[in-house]
Image (cartoon, rainbow, N blue to C red):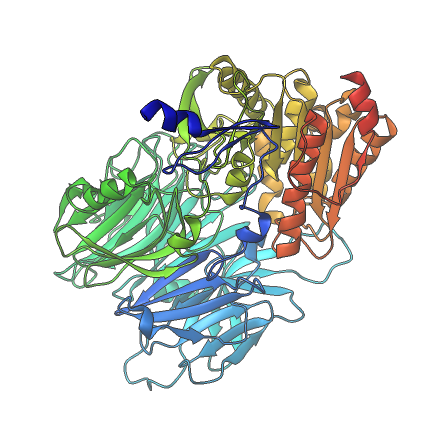
Amino acid sequence: QILRRLLQSIVVTTRGITYTTRAMTQRTVAEYGSWTSNLTPEAFGQGNCGKIGELRVHKDTVFWIEANITTGKKELYATADGRPETTRRWADGLSVQNGVHEYGGGSYIVLPSTGAIVFSTVDGVWVQKSPEQEPLKVIDSEKKTRRFADFEALPVGEGEKGEALPCVLAVEEYHAPSEDPHAEPANRIVLLDLEAGTSSVVRSGADFYMAPRVSPCGNFVSWMEWNHNNMPWDETTIYVQELYPFLVSAPVAPASSETTAVWLKLSGVGRQINYHTPSWSVDGSGTVRFHYTSDQLRFWNVYQVTGWEVEGRALEPNAAPAAWAADAKYQGFARAGLSSPVNMLATPTDIGFPPWNFADAAYAVGRSHSIFNAQGMLYVLRDGEMEAVNKDLTQRCRVLREAQTDWNNYTHMTITDKGVAYCVGQGVKRASTLLRMDLNTDPATISTVRHSRDPSSLEQFDLSIGRRIHWEMEGVPIYGVYYAPLNRHFLAPDGTLPPMVVMGHPGPTLPTSESLDLKKQFLTSRGFAVFDVCYRGSSGGGSVLRNALYSRWGLADRDDLIAGAALVCKQGLADPKRVCVWGSSATGFTALSCAIAAPDVFSAAVSIYGVADLMGLLNDTHKFEKGYNQSLVGRLPEAAEEFRRRSPASHINAMRTPTVFLHGMEDTVVPVQQSVDMFKALRDRGVTAGLMLFEGEGHGFRAASAVKESTEAAYFFLCKVLGIDPSIQSKLEIVNLREHKNKQ
C-alpha cells in the first residue's frame, strides 16, 4: 500500500516529472532561470510605506520619517511611548527632506523646550508647534539655492517666553548663482533665528561640516569637519568649543591651541584616522559626557570623555596629554582636566557604517543605558558595566533567528532617559521596521511600532536565505553571500547548475547586507543563483578592509568579484558558462570593469546608472564626492592617465560582453550620457546591448513604474543572452542579439 501511494504521487508531464504529495506543493521540472514566480516588481512597492528612518525621541515620544508608498514623499510621524494607536502626522502635505551632500538626512529636530519641530523641505526651513497647527516657513530656500540639514537647538535663556521660537544651528549648503557649471557650493554651520527668520554663518572655511551638537549643560558645542579629498569616514576633525565664543567669534575654524575657548580637538589629518558622530549625554548623577566614534584601533569603536564641569575651574593652558597624543603627527589637543578617552565597547568589528547621511547613529547613550550596533550584534551598557545583549536582547533574537524571522541589521539608534531604545531593524524576512526596546526588563521587551511591510505579507514568497563563503585576496579576508535558487513550485532538471548573478553593494564603502532584498529574491525565485560580494573597500570589517580600495577602485573590487565567481563555480554552486555580473552606481563601474577584464567569466552584464567615464564623473559629479574619486583612483593632475586607463569607456572597442544599461535621465551623480555613449558604441560594433532610460528619475529609481521596468528589463536581457526562455517579458529593445546567438 505504501509503494502504491508513492507510485501514484508521480505524474509524468511534457516538461519532465512533477512530484506531488498531500504534504507538498506540486513542483514542476523546468530549466533554471525560466521559473515563474509570484514575486514580481509590483510586489517591491507594496506595504505600508517605504523605508523608515531619521528617528528622534522627545521625552516618551518617538518621531520618524517614512517614504510614502505611492508618492515617494518623506512623511513625518510621531507616536507616544511606542503605542501605534497614538500615531499622528506632522508636516501634513509636505515632504520632509533635504539635499545637502545630495544624500540628505537630519531633516528635522524636536525642540526640547516645547516639543515643536523644525524641519526642512526643498523650499526652506519650517516650524510647526503641534500637529493641529499649520507649518510656518521661517527661512526661504531662495529658489532652492539654500539647503539645510542636521539641526540642533540652542538652550533657551532664563526668562524667555515658552512660545517664542528659539535659535537653532544647522548645516547649510549654499549654491550661489554662477555661470560656472563646476562652481562648488559653500558648506557651513549657520545660526538660524527662527523668530526673526534670519541666518548668520558661525563656522566656515572647511569644505564640509556635520553634526553640530550642544552639550546638555549648554556650555559647549561640538562639530565635525573635513576637507577634500577626504570623505566623512576618512581623515576628519572634531572640535569641542565653548558655546558663546563659537557663536560670536569670526566664522572660521579654530586653528590652534591658542584658541582658549576650544577644549578638545580630535584630528585624524595626516594619520589615516577617522572621527565622526560626536554626541553628548548626561548620566543619572548629572555628569556630562562627550562621545565620538573613531577607528584609531582599526575598528570604529565609541569613546567617552568626561570632565566638562566648568564651575570653579581656573583657565588652564591647552595641553596634549599622552593619552591623546597618539603619535608625532597628532594635531589635536585637550584641555587639561578632561578625562582620558574611554573605549565604551572594545570590539574587533565596526560599530556603525560610513556616514553617508546626516544624523544616522549606530549608538545611543542615555542616562541609565547605552546601546551599540556592532554589525548586527546589539550590546547594552547598563549602570556602568558592559553586558552583551546575549543575556537579554539577543536571546530573543536567537529564537527569531532560528525561526528565520530575526533582525540582523539596525540603524538610527536613539534612546530615552528612561532606558527605552528605538531603532530601525531589518531581517532576512523582515522589511524596514521601527522597533521599541525596553532595556529595563530582563530579557528586554521588544515591540514593533511601525512595519514598512507586514511580515505576514511576505509568507507567500519563496525567500532564499543567504550563506557566507569566505576567502582572502592579497591577505585581506573577504566574503560573499550566496543565495541559491528557491521556488516551491519548480525543480531544475537533474545534473544541471543554475545561472548566477554576481553583484556587489553600492557605495563602494557600504557593507554587504544580508537583510531582506526583494530584488535578489526576484532572481532566486526565477531560478538564478545570486552571489553578493563584500569586496575590498567595504565597511564593517575595520579600516584595513575599508581602505583597501583606495587608489585601486576598478582593480581590487573587480578582481574580488572575478575570484568570487570562480570560487562559487568551483564549489559546484553555479554554471560557469552562465555567470553574469550586475551592479548599480559605484558597482555599476565594477560590473563594467569585470565585463571588460573577464569576458570568459561573465556572459552578460547589467549596469544600473553605473560609472563608465571616471574623468567625466569627476567633472560632472557633485561636491560631496568630487574628492572621493581621487582617493579611489589617484590625485590629479598626476593620475589623469590612470583615470582614463580605468574608465570602461576607454576600453569600449575591446568590450565584447553583452551589456544592458539602465539610467535615470535626471541623474546628478552619474551623468546619463555615460550610459548612452557606452550603448551606442557597443551597438555600432555589433555587440549585443540594451538601453532603457527613465524620465524624471535620478540616481536611484523611485517611481514604481521605473522599478518595475528596470528590474524586468535586466532579467529579460540576461535570459535572452543566456538562451533561457524568460518567464516575464519586457519592452526593452536588444540590439545585435541574433549576431550573439550565431557566435554561440
Whether residue 731 appears in this view of the structure is yes
Please tell me whether residue 444 is drawn above or below residue 129 in the rendered image. above
Q: How many marks?
A: 0
Whether residue 154 appears in this view of the structure is no
Left or right, 651 with respect to 394, comes to: right
Left or right, 374 with respect to 556, comes to: left
Of 538 and 124, which appears nearest the observer? 538
Residue at image point 70% right, 34% down: 717
Question: Where is residue 708 drawn, in percent x and y?
Answer: 63, 49
Question: Furthest-top residue in view?
Answer: 570
Of 585 and 2, which appears nearest the observer? 2
Left or right, 246 with respect to 521, comes to: left
Of 727 and 115, which appears nearest the observer? 727
Question: Furthest-right residue in view?
Answer: 684
Question: Where is residue 63 drawn, in percent x and y?
Answer: 37, 66
Viewport quadrant of the C terminus: top right
Please tell me whether residue 481 is drawn above or below residue 304 in the rendered image. above
Q: Quadrant of residue 594?
A: top right
Question: Where is residue 412 drawn, in percent x and y?
Answer: 37, 53
Residue at image point 31% right, 78% down: 157
Viewport quadrant of the N terminus: top left
Please tell me whether residue 458 is drawn above or below residue 483 in the rendered image. below
Left or right, 192 with respect to 739, comes to: left
Question: Where is residue 720 drawn, in percent x and y?
Answer: 72, 31
